[in-house]
Amino acid sequence: MSVSNPNWKPKIVAFCCNWCSYAGADLAGSGRMAYPADVKIIRVPCSCRVNPLFILRAFERGADGVIMCGCHPGDCHYTSGNYFARRRMTMLFSMLDYLGIERGRTRVEWVSAAEGAKFSKTMNEFVKTIYDLGENRKLGDLRCKK
Amino acid sequence: MQKIGVFVCWCGSNIAGTVDVEAVSEAMKSVPGVVYSANYQYMCSAAGQKLIADAIHEHHLDGIVVASCSPRMHENTFRKTAEAAGLNPYMVEIANIREQCSWIHKDKEEGTAKAIVLARTAVAKLLHNKPLQAGTSAVTKRALVIGGGIAGIQTALDVADAGYEVDIVEQRPTIGGRMAQLDKTFPTLDCSACILTPKMVEASQNEKINIISYAKVEKVDGFVGNFKATIRKKARFVDETKCTGCSLCMSKCPSKKGKDEFNMEMNNRPAIYIPFAQAIPNVAVIDPEQCLKLKTGKCGLCEKVCTAGAINYKQQDELIEREYGAIVVATGFKPIDPSPLNEYGYADNADVITSLELERLMNAAGPTKGTLLRPSDLQHPHEIVFIQCVGSRCDENTKRGKPYCSKICCMYTAKHAMLIRDKYPDTKVHVFYIDVRTPGKNFDEFYRRAVEQYGVDYIKGMVGKVAKEGDKLMVRGSDLINNQQVEIAADLVVLATAIEPDPTARSIGTMLTASMDTNDFFTEAHAKLRPVESPTAGIFLSGVAQGPKDVPETVAQASAAAAKVIGLLAKDHLVTNPCVAYSNELLCNGCSQCEKVCPYGAITYIEKEVRGPGVREVRRIAQVNPAVCQGCGACTVTCPSGAMDLKGFANKQIMAEVDAICL
Amino acid sequence: MTKETLVPVLGIVTDVRVDTPDVKTFRVNAPEGGKCFEHMPGQCAMLSIPGVGEAMFSITSSPTNKEFMEFSIKKCGCLTEWLHQMDAGQMITVRGPYGNAFPVEGDLKGQDLLFIAGGIGLAPLRSVINYVRANRENYGKVRIVYGSRSKNDLVDYPEIVNEWCQEAGIEVFLTIDQPQEGWDGHVGFVPNYVTELGFDPQGRVLVCGPPIMIKFTTQALMNMGFEKTQIYTTMELRMKCGVGKCGRCNIGDQYVCKDGPVFRFDELGELPAEY
Amino acid sequence: MARIKQRAIELLSDGTVMRVIGWEKGEGNCDWSPALFENAAEMENFVYGDYAGANLSKYCLKFNRQEGKTLVVLKPCDTLSFRQLLHEHRIDREKFYVIGAGCKGMKDEKGGLLKCSACKGKEFEVYDEIIDDEEAQKTTALMDRMAGVIELEKMTAQERFDFWRGELSRCIRCNACRNVCPACSCIKCVFDNPASGVQSKAPVTDFEENMFHIIRAYHVAGRCTDCGECSRVCPQNIPLHLLNRKFIKDMNELYGDYQAGVGENERTPLTSYTKEDAEPGIVYERGNA
Amino acid sequence: MMRQFPANQVKKIIESIPCAVYAPVEDGAMVVFERYQDGMELRLDKICTDKTPKDILFPQWENLMHFRVEGKTIELSEQQRCEEDYVLFGVRACDIQAFKVLDRVFLSDPVDTYYAARREHGTIVALACGDPKETCFCKNFGVDPAQPDADVVLWLAGDDYYCEAYTDKGRALMSTWETRDAEEGVVEWVKGEIAKKYDALPFAKLNLKGFDGDHLMEKFNSPKWKKLSMACLGCGSCTFACPTCQCYDIRDYDTGNGIQRYRCWDSCMYSDFTLMAHGTNRPTQVERYRQRFMHKLVYFPSRNEGMYSCVGCGRCIEKCPMNLNIVKVIKALGEGENND
């Protein structure tokens, strides 16, 4: 898909759990492991706090990609939060795919507090995917964009 | 609309280097709700904090956003600043413009633009913040230590020393744990029993310490400061208060087929036994699997010989319910069973033994009374091969062992080698190793002594096969340094088997909702900064339960855990995290979905008359115990009506953040 | 001129006065000064903060005030909470005037007037009272019974004490629900106080306050011999458009926002009891 | 069926139940409506038969806190919804007398109901007594329940997108799907609640149409018994059941077969987990792009 | 002057109209009024479109104005009113009557300028109902399916449309069409046929006696509402399908760049319709259900010289998921022979 607007910058929302992924993002920062500024992080206590509604809301408001990061399965600070999150997100992604929305605009990645490099790598990859997909037209809020 | 102040930190050049802080604080001035915006070199400094406090007073701020380093760094600092200035500490939001902005971006324009979005997002969230009040809960001033090994004993002693009651729950009939089974300890080679048993005695005599042996924790409810544990004390069939530990019954017991667990099952013990001479409590226990009286009703010899009248065949398990303020997990370890690693032939050859078995063979109280004899024919071995890293440091994908280093093997093997060479100079000792790891005080010197002074033959390489040939064990391996295959005809092969958490650890972890890693070691709240605490508040970690450790490390960690326990028990009240879930009773359907995802059992349901606009009826509604809730938010997403929300991370707050980012 | 139905004009809050712990009075001017529009006593206006909401409030000031309009607003919901946080200088949107007015130039003219208000219910009546004060010669005796939960909850207390009470031909009777230190006036609920005071069943009565107060006060008045046709009150319902179109405030064949909010008691009796 | 009517009259007369929820005839032949009967005389108008398509279990919410027992006539598939409401503690079992009524597939004026073509069976999950007829036992499903979903899954993403845009753009947000749904039983729906931040009353944008229906399907995922009422009642003929069935199909495939409203287990696939669950990326790995 | 043109020319005529034409076209499984474009399936045969043409005049949602809020200041810009002429083609008599009901609401003082502008710019071409259907009962409310009241009216007879303009707007529009003088008497014959067909319909004659302001309290207090409303789900299908229902809501939407104030359809059937901070005056579905029908049959005529705000189109009969409808209400609450 081609990018029609050369000045277009994607808006990417990253939900990060406080205990692992947010710390991983901090670690990426301490290690100066760059990733594009298009990614903006929202801190949540646990990946299980991420309501599918938030993800849809982001798309409604014009996000081009939404990524959720949490502790690795088994490592959840709250024991089981990411297991629930995993099922929820699987269902949501499946539904979005079913509705014909491009794959790849949503992603889940497990990033531990130790994986600064993985965080950076993941974000670089994800941003690239979004650039490849281009502007999110299918999900844009018409009224917002007017 | 709330009046919000924004404070942009330069962090010296850490932020100011890639973010135009001036521009950020200027841009914030036109964000709805912001009435004041400033920037400063170091917001966390005394001067920076004063700037914040002054602005709060002067501009009657309802909330502040500090655009600075990660909230994990200074959120608490600024909350305290705000609180001191009369603001609710939860009316503070941090925009992370260092770790998640200035440090990862090089382009100043880009960095500045992102910092503005991040600050704006924090403001958007803050506009929906509500002042939160931390609640309090009382602290039960008693600790529970699960596991009575050296770790548990040390923690208990230290906690008791500070004047608090401690219960030690030990699954075996005696405390002492693995250390009691050791012969000597490295690197000083002092006798293990000589240093451990006085501690055991001290624990038993300390009036603050209550040892509940031959028992297990069955259930734990509650939360930090207010745990309630149910402990099953198994029937010993011996009255603890009467038994004098004379051991007469042991000699008279006709059933001698019980395996002696203390001696790694290398010999038998009677059905009634005291695990070892210095056992605490020094009280006999009847093994119901072996006891003829209990199995067939015919015998009763021990009862007849017991002058104290301590034998009671009708004794039942006893359930003890007690309340605790803190729980220490000191469940320790066991060596893995090396049988599945069939190249070492452990299952097939009696003379392939584990290090802990060797430890018993060399111990004066062991099956051979301290003489080194090989198990198969009780002959003195002349050629001994030690194999390192058996089941440790394995490729995770092969599932043949543990991925981690068991840490203690290098040192105890050096110890064993040295002791054997010292006592039996005619014996040749070879050690197959991958690396020799000796990072510890006097450890490397110790290892070098083994090599240099005692002539232990260290071969860098792996063993491919141990096979019985005649009365010899042929050990085939590679010598990486000389780049050749070696074959040694050994009399005895000793496996430095990996250690793994005690099998009970997993169920205890689940019971305590304490997180564990994939190897069943308990996870610490922070690998560096909170190494003796579990992420679950009020649960502390002592000893190998948290990860492989040697004795000095274990004792050090045990004392550290004790210090944390004392810190907790010293408080009369705990301040609870106010960022917990709560349910809006007007919206709650009472459908019980949230309860099912709560990892803490914090949600209960009550029938209640709810009142609201046009509503006055009895409904079933969810209630969250704020002292139990840890604030994960699983319930909030499960709730279809949005009745369940999380303070500090409310739906509206997160959606405001989303909106602000996507603006 | 076709009046725009839904498009508001802008207004500036030029003064915020704290009346009681949960009532503030806002003075509103047009951005260019003066009033946003003219009105008659009892009429309402829709105030709004874009993005927060829009709601109907009665105009508290008298049309005889030529400089500004005032709204006394009790904090009770999302919008009012927002309004209460406003400082002077804040812009809001205003549209109106909506609804009918008390018949100050009709049925009330030449009559003795009895005003009975409870709590924030004084807001719509204050407009009438001040209108009557400004056109004193057109009306007979004026008596005002006003009650609130406590002394602190009496709206416009300084104006009542310093102006109304000082004026010849106006009698003011204040009461609060519970005894309170520093209060030597009457204590008791408004309907009881009205009964205690006892009024000749003549002239016109304007009642405004919480539904329960209105109910018992009218009973008390009727016991004294007042006719339903002598009693006026105002109603409050969910409103959205203010022009009798959106359907919300429809009761029977009336639209409260357009045909009300002022109703004579006999008119109310002809409506289904859905208020 | 006269037997149901007769039995209901008996139970009303002997005081076992205080009211009956059933059906009554309309003006024509096919326009039956759910109705309330409070005494034997009113039962004159009671009917049960080919046009009793509506699922009466949601009406139970209305009567749960009322005095005495309510008799409710439920078809086999309706009893699943009833069980699900029991699971969710929304109704009390002892407040209802359930007559399980045999069903050989329901109709409306246009013919057999779509929901009945994928009949889930003739078993009653909950009942106090069953009044069945032999005919009912003989009828079977006419089609694979997942056929529609599978057909869509086979399409390309663009085709699916166009399909759903076409369907969902007709939505007028009348809320019939929500209000009829026994799983959408929230006291206050998030989309009606100004405090939720997502309140919306009109499908003001393409996206809000999607959002409403995705979230609705998501909220009932694992709780939806696939009673098919949403599609039956949609005045705009949107095949909403295809959203719910997609979730059902996914959950069955990924987390093991599950039917909401069956058995004693109150946990749904979304309130349980296994450590070995598939990663969300599986969605992208299967099927065509 | 009555004219006629071959029915197969109707597409051509529509395409020849220079402004936007809204006509009944097929959309999925439904027939709705949409802006006609080449290639669309014209469905003039459909008696009652699935969605009423009311949303041409009163759209389901429309922006009213836009605010920019900065600091303490507010900037307001109005949404432009409709400025383009358009033609509404193929509207039936009942829906045209519904426009008159809407006019009573939106054009009464103070005038709703958004609605007024649309009304003014539209020219309505009506189509007589040659084949009224089973659910029709329009004549009860003074609607003649054979003689709609519009700018231009069409009658289909055989292979030809007969047309006559009744207003200047209509005449101007029709003058551009290619037509010939109409054969005499045909339309009269068609009208007669329509009347005959209508009279044979089940709801052709309902007794509306007693549905007036004089019986307001009596109808309001009827105990029958409880049972009548039992099955009501409280959804908005009837109100949204109804050509006269015009309750609306005004809402603000934060676009991120300002506040959009929009109006959207609302329904008195919704539980939150009258909900305010301290409760609602219609707490259960019984009251809400009663409100809708009382409004149509009693309140509205009481305010509007006996004009009912039901036009007998029968859409609610088709759309109600639970088969509740206004005919059942009329029959249950009415007087005389209905009351069986």
Image (spheres, coloured by chain):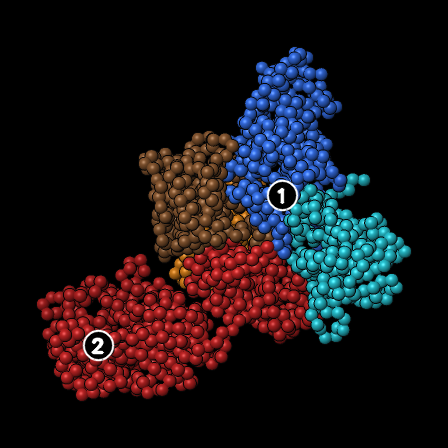
Figure chain in blue? E
Q: Quadrant of residue B262?
A: bottom left
Q: Nearer the viewer, residue C92 or E53?
A: E53
Q: Using the rendered image of the protein, determine whether residue B178 is visible from the camera's viewpoint.
A: no
Q: Is residue C110 above or below residue B500?
A: above
Judging from the image, mark 1 belongs to the subunit labelled E
Figure chain in orange? A
Same subunit: marks 1 and 2:
no
Q: Which residue is mark 1?
A: E220
Q: Is residue C261 above or below residue D115?
A: below
Q: Amino acid at mark 1?
A: Phe
- The residue at 33%/65% (across/down) is B519
- The residue at 26%/68% (across/down) is B336
Provide residue B579's location: percent of width, then percent of height. 52, 65
Q: Closer to the camera: disc 1 or disc 2?
A: 1
Figure chain in brown? D
Question: From the viewer's perspective, is B588 left or right of B47?
Answer: left
Q: Which residue is mark 2?
A: B314
Q: Is residue B316 above or below residue E170?
A: below
Chain B, which colour?
red
- The residue at 71%/57% (across/down) is C219
Provide residue D168's location: percent of width, then percent of height. 52, 39
Question: From the viewer's perspective, is E199 left or right of C98?
Answer: left
Determine the residue located farthest toward the left in the rendered image.
B470
Chain C, which colour?
cyan
Q: Are marks 1 and 2 in contact (CB under 8 Å)?
A: no
Q: Using the rendered image of the protein, determine whether residue D70 is visible from the camera's viewpoint.
A: yes
